Image (spheres, helix red, strand yellow):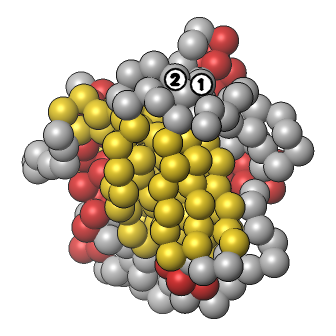
Amino acid sequence: MIRRLALTIGLLGAIGGTAAADDGTALKGVVELFTSQGCSSCPPADAALKTLIDEGEVVALAYHVDYWNYLGWADTLATKENTDRQYAYARMLGRSGVYTPQVVLNGRDHTNGSDLQAIKTRLATMSASGGGLAVPVDASMGGEEISIRVGAGEGKANVVVVYFDRAREVKVERGENRGREIAYWHAVKDIQTIGMWDGRPAQFTLPASVLIEGRGNSGCAILLQSMKDAETPGPIIGATTLLAGPQGKL
């Protein structure tokens, strides 16, 4: 059963081609899963996200939320900022509440995070109708720097870096998932806006230490996300992922 919560708070040189997966094919989209260790309906969605990560055709992120902590287990990966992002999406989508497991697709639509086929179908429909990742984004690590390159396109957007732990295994000791040992992938730990894009090719630089400090278990996604207003996210029009360590870029 999907867990739902009423909405009670209000927050929150040119590069050619489109965003590409590691094999050079176009990325199919961005999947943002809102999940919780305290939600009994979430483990299938966590597993579905892992499948998407393994397939390598999308940018996949898991935002652990804190509003189910009262059920008896405080999610060890949850942050208030993750919860704020989900509520901001609820405002953007015109919804009166939030739920887990929820996935937001390309910042444009949502569905049950456990329904892998629905996720893939909706992403394909978006791409076919112009709602895919139209602006190329690339990131690479060299020496002491991370270089982020955004290609040309239309409109304006924020350049958002989402930092995550590549993999965590958690033994849940209380609550609805009591006694289960669950693997979590791409669990978001911080979100930062590092700049703005105005349709022209642009480049941004970060210190490589933001990933190296993760001791090989860290990564980041770079999202080119337009905004509905100052606090409300809108469509994601470009994205890529970068991992620390020898694995490199997804």
Whether 153 is drawn above or below 197: the answer is above
**Point 53% across, 83% down: residue:** 209
Whether 162 is drawn above or below 166: the answer is above
**Point 55% across, 28% down: residue:** 152
Q: Position of residue 231 (x, y in %)?
A: 18, 43
* Drawn side of residue 76 relative to residue 245, left or right: left
**Does residue 179 show up?**
no
Q: Position of residue 71 (x, y in %)?
A: 30, 72
Report the residue marked by disc 1. Answer: 134
Q: Nearer the viewer, residue 175 or 50?
A: 50
Amino acid under disc 1: Ala
Q: Position of residue 95 (x, y in %)?
A: 25, 30
For the residues bearing labels 2 and 1, Cβ distance under 8 angstroms: yes
Q: Position of residue 12 (x, y in %)?
A: 19, 48
Report the residue marked by disc 2. Answer: 153
* Residue furthest to the top: 129
